[in-house]
Image (cartoon, rainbow, N blue to C red):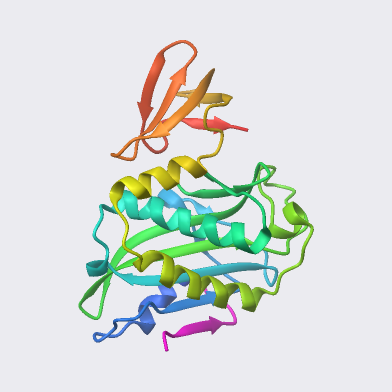
Amino acid sequence: MTPIIYLKECASTNDEILHFLKSDQTAFPAVYTFNQKKGKGQYGNSWESAADINLAFTLAVPSALIKMPTHLFNFHTAAAVADFLAIMTNMQPEIKWPNDIIIKNKKVAGLLLEKKTAAGISYFILGIGLNVLQKSFPNLPKAGSLLTQTGNEFNLHEIANDLHIYLQHFLIKETSENEVLGNLNNWLFRKNKISVFEIKGVRQNGIIKEVDPEGFLRVDLENEGLQRFYHKEIELLY
């Protein structure tokens, strides 16, 4: 049976899982906690999470099993989490490029994909922060939880175990790079809608068109026409 380990508290599940990986590891082990002290977000950011009401979950995937570029696997994992939440909530989540999960215009989950070596084996370390039971976010106006966005309460342990099972099946399914990119663009937040963006401190209107095969976001800007952007080069204001 693939192990999933509950930690009463920890600094970061993405760091803690390295202690549980073995040289003969073939399964997808996971660790989770409801009390993460120093959660990590994308590009050096931190992931803030209130204790005992939210989930911090990390899955280790042997990189030898993944037959696609890292940026596409990043999108693939975002689609997996969105699909899981769609089934669980009976709602339509969206993916805010590159891999935040949005429900009803609020961010409920963030992903962090890292590549690390443990016990001589290379892994993709997939960290997921999921807001579950938190009722208010006074310093994070764009954040929400499954409770605030659906009105339903969920059991934290059940979510962790169900997510572990679902990800294992989803991530090993045979798929093509075109399918991965197509799934991302189908889930894409604010696609084909007029939105406000900030680029180098300047705001202007634009329309998200798609994410291209290299992972760039293509935006049709009001003043500059169709442009492509990499992470941190553009900010969507919503």
Q: Quadrant of residue 133?
A: bottom right
Residue at left offset 48%, top offset 42%: 186
The residue located at (50%, 40%) in the rendering is 188
Question: Could you say where residue 96 lies in the image, as x and y percent from the top left?
Answer: 52, 42
Q: Residue at x 42, y 72 (%)?
A: 168
Whole-percent x, y for residue 97 in the image: 47, 41
Residue extending farthest top: 223
Q: Quadrant of the C terminus?
A: top right
Residue found 69% across the figure and 56% down from its top:
145
- Relative height, residue 10 to residue 20 (above, below): above
Along the viewing direction, whichever of 65 and 223 lies nearer the viewer: 65
Residue 206's x, y, as percent?
51, 20
Residue 231, placed above or below residue 44: above
Q: Is residue 52 magenta?
A: no
Drawn side of residue 175 relative to residue 45, left or right: left
Q: Which residues are magenta?
A: 1-11
Does residue 104 appear in this view?
yes
Q: Tell me where residue 16 sits by quadrant.
A: bottom left
Q: Would residue 97 appear left or right of 56 to someone viewing this image? A: left
From this viewpoint, is residue 98 visible?
Answer: no
Q: Is residue 10 magenta?
A: yes
* Prevailing SS of the magenta stretch: loop
The picture places residue 157, in percent across and down from the top left corner, at 63, 78
Residue extending furthest toward the bottom:
1
The quarter of the rendered structure image containing the N terminus is bottom left
Report the label total: 0
